Image: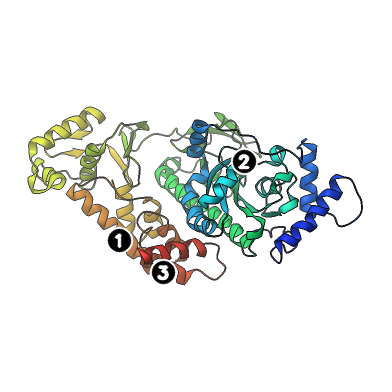
Amino acid sequence: MGPRPERSPRPDDDPVAHAKVLDGVFDRVLSEDPRGPRPRPVVSASWQRSLAAHVDPERRVPPVVFDRTQLDAAREAHPLAEVLPLLRSTLASIADEAMHVMLVTDGAGNVLWRDGAAKLLVTADDVGLFPGTNWSEQAIGTNAMGTALAVGRPVQIHSAEHLVRTYHSWTCVAAPVHDPDTGAVLGAVDVSGPLHTVHPALVQLVTATAQLAEHHLRVRMAIADERLRMENMAHLTRLGPAAGALVTRTGRLLAGNPYGWWPERVPIRDGRLADRLLLDDGSEVVVEQLEEGWLLRSPGSPRRTPTPPDTPVLTLRFLGGGPPRATLDGRPLALTLRPAEVLTALVVHPDGLTGGQLAHLLYGDEGNQTTVRGEVHRLRALIGADLLLTRPYRVSAAVDSDVVTARRALAGGRITEALAASPGLLLPRSEAPLVRELRDELAAGLRRAVLETDDADLLHRLAGCPVGAEDLAVHERLLELLPPGDPRRPAVAVRRDRLQQS
């Protein structure tokens, strides 16, 4: 569990009466009257920081820092975009019903997203509670979003605890969301509304939602780590007994030989590692960039090469919601759906296919070999005639395919590996008979295997990917396995209820 948030002393008992008490505290402190009660420590410290930043308590609204184009770009690039559906399913509907607004900021306090009751959004617009504004303490003084970011823990700010008088009719609760990789604060989740709508459960709900978002990001990171290990472990293996390590883009160690010799992190400067790196014990290692990370090796070890040495490596990533991705020896290929379907058929039939067989797999009974020859001709032009052979059609490169990896892992009972290789459905826009069959086979096999484990963490990962996102049985079983108090329960329960009603 995360740290307990600091709370205004029971504003939910009588929020209006409590607001009057806070108004008196506010006026006495700003007039430097030493008599009477003082603000809570978290509020007092925030006021001091805000006043030191020259925030005027009579100032009306926060600055607008993003126009529409900048806002769209900031949203698209921000890590919390991945958990926005989760935040909306957990908080937005509750905020709408309770006459609150839900806001999500980046680490600098810039509001990126907002949801809530339509009537209240108009009022929120009038006081600057809308996307594109900055709510750091330096910009607009003490408020739940800015203060939660400043102290790194959940905060409730009620009425006149806001430094700017404009917001004395509001109450707000915010909790920071941390990057599970670096520990840095990615942003804050906030629920704000009129002071008379404050609810005693709001603090716990927002805190649990932020923890749930962090857990979701941690699961995504674990999946990405597993994929990076699977795709690049061969480079480490080729070094033999020589020292070597796989490192993420952020410098975090994923695997190393010898075990225990490598630091947990290596320093990254401007998103890069130097060509050579000096470790804490004085050892020097050579740095080689991978597609999604780094390979570190001792200077005398062999350079990274494909296996066997002169065989090109064709990497295919067809499981997911985006367009098909492929690289040839690390060089990206511009792959559209039809050649991706052809490659899918060939990699699951490594011994080769005749023109008739390939036509049937891709087009069904209506398929013809002339169409297939045209598709193969275009694909050979893309990857090279020496890598796509004929009579029968087959791929001669070394193939690293997520489809093949997931099928083998499932067949071998390696469920975690299969789930890591399957972030989405196989070529979801494809209607080719073979692809539909493989898509259903992988989805059904993964669902069955995960359900049989009774592993809550695996089930939660399944529920968060397309295979299980709309599966009522998965969500019902997950709720049975999650213990009371688990921060994942609220979001799972909301999705379960929605699936029951659909």
Mark toward the start of the polypeptide (1 vs 3): 1
How far across and how far down the image is residue 199, in percent? 63, 63
Q: Amino acid at mark 3?
A: Glu
Classify 409 as above or below 473. above
Q: In the rendered image, which quarter contains the C terminus?
A: bottom left
Q: Amino acid at mark 2?
A: Gly
SS under mark 1 = helix
**Nearer to the camera, 289 or 42:** 42
Task: Tell me the distance, in whole angstroms, between the alpha carbons under discs 1 and 2.
Answer: 50 Å
Classify 234 as above or below 287. below
Left or right: 303, with 98 as reference point: left
- Read off the residue under disc 3: 476
Left or right: 371, with 33 as reference point: left
Mark toward the start of the polypeptide (1 vs 2): 2
Task: Tell me the distance, in whole angstroms, between the alpha carbons under discs 1 and 3.
Answer: 19 Å
Q: Nearer the viewer, mark 1 or mark 2?
A: 2
- Read off the residue under disc 2: 128
The label on residue 484 is: none
Please tell me in which quadrant of the rendered image residue 306 appears: top left
SS under mark 3 = helix
How far across and how far down the image is residue 464, in percent? 42, 56
